[in-house]
Amino acid sequence: MKIAVLPGDGIGTEIVAQAVKVLEALRKDGEKIELEYAHIGGAGYDAAGDPLPEATLKLSKESDAVLLGAVGGYQYDTLARPLRPEQGLLRIRKGLGLFANLRPARVYPELVNASTLRAEVVSGLDILILRELTGDIYFGQPRGIRTLDSGERQGFDTMHYSESEVRRIAHVGYQIALKRNKKLCSVDKANVLDTSMFWREIVTEVAKEYPQVETSHMYVDNAAMQLVRFPKQFDVILTGNIFGDILSDEASMLTGSIGMLPSASLDSNNKGLYEPSHGSAPDIAGKDIANPLATILSVAMMMQYTFGRADVSQRIETAVHKVLHQGLRTGDIFEAGMQKIGCSAMGDAVVKAL
Ligand code: IPM
Ligand code: MG
């Protein structure tokens, strides 16, 4: 298992260090794991003047999987857009063809009370947001800031989805749904956007190939509301890049904390980039208080999806479960009666439980 490790910025270095502890423990147990580090985001800019240095993309292409922390920091906010940390992330997703982004939101019984929603609303929740990751308004051209004939300035972006892009993500959605509860809800804004009308047309066509799966369509505004009203109605949510960005942050809070949400971004051969769904949290960076569990759970996803090792994946998830059961909590999921620990101690606890 050749894994490129890209810690990135902010809490990225701290949380990735914990996930690496887990990988090293697995190696001690005989798994053939090879790790190689590279810079991305602000760290890439600092080291090589580029948020995605050429060497980083090359290493990532040559590896079987990529483990990524997070990118971004206050000191980079004033850089020109092509040099911003986020560009490193967007370019590596595009450069590796990682069009399928899986963001599972699962509520661990131990964390039912950590959610801002009532326990009965979230208890037992297990949904998966499948976000298309290399198209949509994120990458559409033209875009920019222009001056109109009137002399007024205008910002603009372009939303589009081609048929092949919608088709391939829809197929991934159905394949996943077949292995889960066989329900797929496609989320769009077909009452307003032509891109969405087209999206719905193609998903409806693909749906015919999967009669075993119950398909529904929902407007994104309604989906945002339903996610907090009655989230257990969902199994797989299939959606485009920007709607998926927004809905997956919303879904993370159902689980108690965005610090618990892993993600996998896959190409058509299950090569993948694995990262927590959260950002670099510069406000708490360097304090050893971040929650490393989303990153550790991302390693579990890596074992399952890229390496086909459901056994190892399960082992990591069980270890995380055990640690929560022991009452160990980072600050973001802390509640009275539990034991508050730091990022590094949480990593150690998972390794011990492993
Ligand atoms: C995410 C993040 C990124 C995105 C940013 C950092 C570019 O919010 O992974 O959800 O918008 O995709
Ligand atoms: Mg986001």
Image: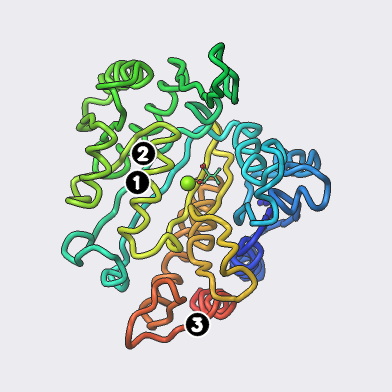
Camera sees residue 247: yes
Considering the numbered disc 1 on the image, is that residue within a helix, a strand or a loop? strand
List the residue tagged with mark 2. Answer: 176
x, y percent for residue 214: 20, 32
Q: Tell me which label, 3 or 1, sits earlier in the chain.
A: 1
Instruction: Name the residue: 75% across, 55% down.
Output: 37
What is the crowding at mark 2: few (fewer than 14 residues within 10 Å), some, or many (at least 20)? some
Q: Is residue 235 left or right of residue 308?
A: left
Q: Which residue corresponds to the image point at 50% horizontal and 34% vertical from the top-left?
A: 133
Dot 3 corresponds to which residue?
Answer: 341
On the rendered structure, is 128 left or right of 54? left
Residue at left offset 53%, top offset 38%:
266
Residue nearest the viewer, comparing 201 with 61: 201
> What residue occupies the far right of the structure in this picture?
48
Q: Nearer the viewer, mark 3 or mark 1?
A: 3
Residue 304 point in image, percent of width and height: 48, 50
> Amino acid under label 2?
Ile
Q: Are marks 1 and 2 in contact (CB under 8 Å)?
A: yes
- Do the numbered discs 3 and 1 sit on residues whose CB atoms are within 8 Å? no
Q: Distance from label 1 to label 2 (Cα)? A: 9 Å
Image side of residue 204 versus residue 332, left or right: left
Pick whichever of labels 1 and 2 is earlier in the sequence. 1
Give the numbered dot on residue 128: 1
